[in-house]
Image (tube, helix red, strand yellow):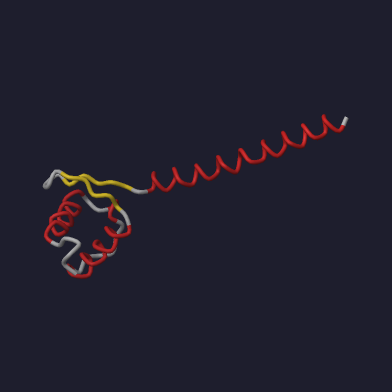
Amino acid sequence: MKRIAGLFLFGCVLMSAAPMRADDDHEERREKVEARRYYDRHARDWHSWDDNEQRHYQRYIQENRRDNREFNRLRRNQQDQYFRWRHEHSDDNR
C-alpha cells in the first residue's frame, strides 16, 4: 500500500511540474511574437521594432514635430519618411 501511495505522490509531483514548464515557454514565445518587423522598401531591409527603434522613433517625432502616433498606424508614405530619416541617423549619432 505504501508503494502505491508513493508512486501516486511521485506521479502527482511530475505532473505538477509539466504545466509550470509549459507556461514558461509560452511567455518566451509571446515575447518573440510581440517583436514586430517592418520592411523598408526604399533601403530594402528589415527593421525590428524594439526599445532601441522606439527611442529613435520618439526622437524623430520630436525633431520633425509630428503627432505621436503608433508606428503601425501610420500611412505607408509616413513610415517610409521615418525609415529614410532612420538611415540618416544611425545608432552612433546621438
Q: Is residue 66 above or below residue 13?
A: below
Q: Is residue 83 above or below residue 39?
A: below
**Along the viewing direction, whichever of 47 and 3 lies nearer the viewer:** 3
> Where is the C terminus found, in terms of image quarters?
bottom left
Give percent across and percent down for residue 47: 23, 49
Left or right side of 59 for 25: right
Give percent across and percent down for residue 62: 22, 70
Q: Quadrant of residue 22?
A: top right
Left or right side of 2 for 66: left
**Along the viewing direction, whichever of 84 and 18 lies nearer the viewer:** 18
Q: Quadrant of residue 3?
A: top right
At x 31%, y 57%, the residue is 70
- Furthest toward the front, the residue is 3
Left or right side of 68 for 18: right
Give percent across and percent down for residue 79: 20, 53
> Where is the N terminus found, in terms of image quarters?
top right
At x 17%, y 58%, the residue is 86
Left or right side of 5 for 33: left
